[in-house]
Image (tube, rainbow, N blue to C red):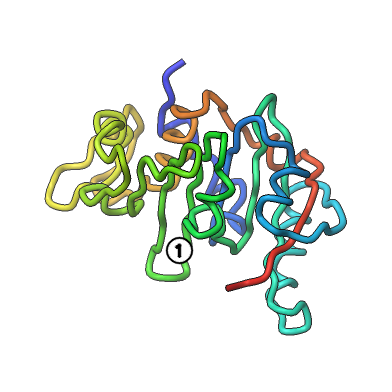
Amino acid sequence: MTASTSDYMWFEERFPDLAASYCLTLVHEVSPAELLHRLGGRAEPARAGVAELVEAAYDFHAPSSGLRTLFGMTSIGPWTLMVEPNGWHGVDEERALPASAGTRWISHYDNGNANNDGSFLWAENTDRRLQFDLRDAGYRCGSQPDALLDVIRRLGFEFPGEPVPTDGFDADSDADVAVPASFALAEHLTQVRLTPSHLAEATFVCGSVKIG
């Protein structure tokens, strides 16, 4: 099945609190416990559903938390999905690249509260294959910056100065499709089609890491 941007238009409508600032990461054949270890994290109580995870995560940004960020992990087949509300470690190369040793690491981050700051990262075994700004796919870095160029164009990522294709969905020329396109690109690389139930109904194994 071909990944499509239109398949993920539900995310920002169904989960606006998470979509306001999030990072989602899929890691192949690495368990939640192993992922927590790789990130140098501390185990935290589990949370049921992403709404509870989001609420708890924002409390971790208070000074009383010691400036830590909370994230949740759940298994989807051979993949671990890591959800970071108001976090970014999945696309931070200082943490993500070492943690990607021996595995495939696919992550996307967006913070609509910070001038639409966003990033997509594909890493393999500590090698950054591809990374680009969600709203400027014209500038890409990594060891394989053009490997997914045709897919990136089809999904509707913005190339400043070029018309934006719609990938079969009904959107006007000013529509920002960077977030649903990121979900679709992640699916293309993992064959994991995320659904609302993956976020709403999962029990998340949780951990936290220090900021900075």
Nearer-the-camera pick, 188 or 32 = 32
Residue 22 in view of the camera = no
Residue at 31%, 41% (x, y): give it.
Answer: 143
Name the residue at 60% across, 32% down.
28
Q: In the orientation shown, which residue stands out farthest toward the top?
A: 1
Classify mark 1: helix, strand or loop. loop
| Residue visible at 30% across and 43% down in the picture | 157
Query: Which part of the image, by quadrant, shows the C terminus?
Result: bottom right
Residue 22 image point, x, y percent: 56, 56
Q: Is residue 104 above or below residue 59?
A: above
**Toward the viewer: 194 or 105?**
105
* Residue 149 visible in the picture: yes
**Is 79 on the left-hand or right-hand side of 124?**
right
Front residue of 195/137: it is 137
Position of residue 186 relative to residue 88, above or below, is above
Residue 201 position in % (x across, y down)? 77, 39
Local packing at callout 1 (Cα closer than 10 Å; few below 14, some 14-19, many 20+) is: few
**Which residue is identified by label 1?**
112
**Residue type pointed to by label 1:** Gly
On the picture, is 14 further left or further right than 172?
right
